[in-house]
Structures are given as structure tokens and as C-alpha cells.
Image (cartoon, helix red, strand yellow):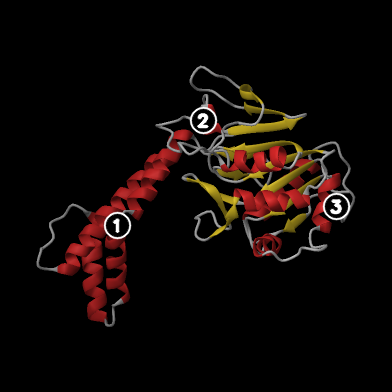
Amino acid sequence: MPRLVILNLADPGQMGPVTRVKRGLEAKIQAGPRTVLVGEDVVPIHDLFDELKDLQDGTPLGDKLKAARDDCDVAEKIYLCTHGLANDTEHAFAKASGGEALGTWKDFGRLIRKVLPKRSKHYKVALVMCYGARTDEYYARDLDHQGMIPLTLLNTSFAYKMFHYLCSDHGRTMTMTARTGAVGFDDTTGKSSVEQEAAIDIALEKEEFLRSPKIDRVMKQWAAYRRAIDSDKAAQEWLKIDNKYRDDPKAYANPFNKKAVAGKAYHQALARKIALETQKSAYQDLQKYGKLVYTHIGGTLTIVNKYGNNGGIGPQTVLYTGPFL
């Protein structure tokens, strides 16, 4: 029987992150006391993309979830894998970069409710989702999630809203972990790491910079000039401008040469992007960081900041206990 189960809503085709999670969890099991039989799949993966879509479309699921349900029923822990964004507490995605959303926290709750149907069982779930526990006050400069989180914000994260749906609305007994930053996973040890609060703000600043209308237009214009190259002469002209402003983004550009102006603007924007990336790289992801633990037993909700270390709080600080918020 499987010890750990992965529910995959992160990696269509199982080509990337979910396979790393599987390898890491298998390595963790192999390093432990349990004997693993040859050929035994101790960490099965269940893709749930089609089932989520069927649920959203109102299509009856029938027995489509039976295999996942059976494995989860005997699992010690269930890993629900998907992608999230720091500034979106409503949706989950199939790509780390976002794009079209897979669904809302309620869509996920409706699906997981069918995978974990027993009200009498205490399920243990890890929500492996970047920023799953991050609140609507997503900038760390406004709210450091390593410290105390006000009750008015604690209930705004994707993780909380899905947990509330499963436990308060549908009576599940459950312990669920979720992360406040981007999640990394070491596939050789099974250990996870989380993005630091300062790094989150830098990443948000970079994304907002690149998505601003002016900078977006600059990037697209320079790319359009590149795509329009149709001769060796045009290629040499493009490279001359590109190299000039790559070496010195602040160099003077003839205002009558539109392509040169575009090249200068592009490399000024690129220099800012690189500077932010360099700044962010100084903050390495940390193990034992950025984890909230949600527990619902007997009608009582408890939320713990497992690795809290800011604002006068320490590890295992209880952020809240009582009825659902």
C-alpha cells in the first residue's frame, strides 16, 4: 500500500516539478526504516486535470476518482501539487508563470472533497503550491508572513479558503500545511525550501516593472525590430545597436533614429531587470521557513506558524485557535 500519494494539478504530462517531488519523497522513504519491495510504487501520482475540468463543466465523474480515492484512503500523507502566484489568492495554475487559471480554491475544494470523502478519517495533506498560504497583503513590506498575521488577513489565502470549504462546509477532519513563498524541492533528499520574504518583494517588483504598459511596449518593440530582420545588412544594423546599448544602457541615442531609441530603451529596461534578479539572488531559499499548519479537529480550527521568526514570535506560534474565521 502506498505510504505517500501525489495528486497532480501542477505538471501536465509529468515532465517536471511533480516528478521531482516524487523522486524526493521516494528518496526520503528509502532513507527511512521502511523496507520497500522491488517494483513497489510507494509514491503513486494521480493526474486530476481531466477530473477538475469535468467537475467544472458539470460532467458526472463516475468512477474516475476511485484509484486516487483508494490510494489516499490508506496513505500516511497526501501531496496536492499545483502552482500559485504571490498576488493571486483565488486561483491555481498549471504553470509556475501563471497564465490561464486551472480553477479557484472552491473548484479545488469540490474536487478534493470527492477524493477525500470520509468525515471520520483524519487526513494529512501538504499543499505543494507556491504562495498557497500568502494573504491578500502579499507584499512583505506590508505584512511579513514570518510574523503574526492579523485574523482579518489570515482567512484570505488560497490555502485557508480551500481548507475552510473542506472542513467547515463539508466536515472533513484534516491537518494541512501550506507555504507562504515559492516552493523548491530537492529530489535527492525530499527536503523542501521556501523563498524568503525579502526575495518575494523583489520578485514582485520585477514582475510589476516588466508588466507596466511602458516597459511591456519597449520589450515588444525591440522584439518586433528583431523579427523584422530580412537581410544581412539589417542584421548588422540591429546587432550594432544591440551591442552598443548592451555595453552601456545609458549611452546617448540619436532621437531621429527610432531603432536606436528602441534599442536604448530595451537595454535600460533589461539592465533594471538584471539588477533586480541579482538583488534577489542574494536571498537564498531556506529550509524550515514559511510554513503554516492548518488543523481542524472536533469543530476547532488551529493555525500555527511553524517556523515563525519575526515580530516577536518564534517557531510553533499559534496564530489562531477557535471556530472558523
Give the residue at x 76% y 47%.
26
- The earlier-in-sequence mark between 1 and 3 is 3
Name the residue that disc number 2 marks: 152
Q: Position of residue 146 (x, y in %)?
A: 52, 28
Q: Position of residue 258 (x, y in %)?
A: 16, 68
Name the residue that disc number 1 marks: 213
Amino acid at dot 1 = Pro
Given residues 104 and 40, the one toward you in this image is 104
Give the residue at x 18% y 52%.
250
Name the residue that disc number 3 marks: 70
Judge left or right: residue 227 versus residue 139. left
- The earlier-in-sequence mark between 1 and 2 is 2
Judge left or right: residue 142 versus residue 35. left
**Callout 2 secondary element:** helix
1 and 2 marks in contact (CB < 8 Å): no
**Callout 3 secondary element:** helix
Instruction: Using the image, determine if residue 313 lies above or below residue 56.
Output: above
Name the outermost residue toward the bottom: 231
